Image (spheres, rainbow, N blue to C red):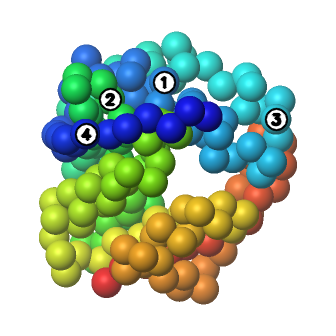
């Protein structure tokens, strides 16, 4: 992957007009980050157009159930996105929030874009609001990123079927 230089990054709430760009980043990120972890056939079959339609539906409906999505952009180009809302875990604490996704265009990895997105989510949720997220155990890059931003494994794990493979996910917690 050719590294792309990232200049000034703007973080803002996502709109329905961002749907296809979010989907494109989502698919490219999965294909790069999960190569060798998620079955290749599943990754090659990801459909950005279908995901774009789903994202448009979600963003048109607005922040249902207090779900918020932010995008990072530079020079008019969407570089990544993050979504968070109420924790979906059965053992969630009152007021706990969950980061559902943080994905970047792979060419922007290592340029501080994810750092700006996670800082935005933490600030929006509230510095003292407990946050959780789930990360694939085999995704060491993401696990390291979350640890650097104050998240730690809390001992809860689950198996998730992704493309026909049972993959271990670890819950990380902050606050």
The answer to whether the residue labelled 1 contacts the one labelled 3, judged by CB atoms less than 8 Å apart, is no
Q: How far apart are marks 4 and 3 (CA)?
A: 33 Å
Which residue shows up at 66% across the image and 25% down it?
46
Q: In which quarter of the image is residue 168?
A: bottom right
Secondary element at tag 3: helix
- Nearest to viewer (mark 4 / mark 1): 4
The residue lying toward the viewer, choosing from 162 and 44, is 44
Q: How many marks?
A: 4
CB atoms at circles 1 and 2 under 8 Å apart? yes
Q: What element carries label 1?
A: helix
> What label does residue 78 carry, if any?
2
Residue 168 to residue 117: above or below: below
Q: Counting residues from the N terminus, which is met first, the one under dot 1 or under dot 2?
A: 1
Residue 23 in the image: x percent, y percent? Answer: 46, 26
The CA span between labels 4 and 2 is 12 Å
How crowded pointer 3 is (Cα within 10 Å; few <14, some 14-19, many 20+) is rated as few
- The dot on residue 40 is 3
Q: Where is residue 48 in the image (x, y as percent from the top left)?
A: 55, 20
Is residue 125 shown to the viewer in this render?
Answer: no
Q: Looking at the image, is 123 positioned above or below residue 173?
A: above
Neighbours of disc 2 within 10 Å: few (<14), some (14-19), many (20+):
many
From the viewer's perspective, is the residue at label 2 or at label 3 nearer?
2
Q: Nearer the viewer, mark 4 or mark 2?
A: 4
Lateral position of residue 43 relative to residue 155, left or right: right
Image quadrant containing the N terminus? top right
Q: Distance between the residues labelled 2 and 3?
A: 26 Å
Above or below, comparing residue 51 to residue 171 in the picture: above
């Amino acid at each position: 992957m050719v590294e792309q230089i990232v200049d000034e990054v703007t973080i803002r709430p996502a709109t329905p007009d961002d749907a296809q760009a979010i989907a494109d980043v989502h698919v490219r990120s999965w294909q790069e980050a999960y190569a060798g972890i998620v079955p290749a056939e599943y990754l090659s079959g990801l459909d950005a157009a279908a995901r774009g339609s789903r994202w448009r539906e979600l963003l048109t409906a607005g922040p249902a159930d207090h779900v918020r999505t932010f995008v990072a952009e530079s020079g008019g180009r969407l570089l990544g996105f993050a979504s968070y809302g109420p924790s979906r875990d059965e053992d969630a604490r009152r007021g706990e929030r969950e980061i559902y996704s943080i994905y970047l265009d792979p060419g922007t990895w290592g340029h501080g874009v994810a750092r700006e997105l996670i800082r935005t989510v933490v600030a929006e949720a509230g510095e003292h609001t407990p946050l959780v997220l789930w990360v694939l155990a085999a995704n060491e890059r993401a696990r390291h990123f979350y640890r650097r931003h104050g998240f730690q494994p809390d001992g809860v794990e689950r198996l998730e079927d992704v493309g026909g493979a049972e993959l271990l996910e670890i819950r990380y917690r902050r606050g």
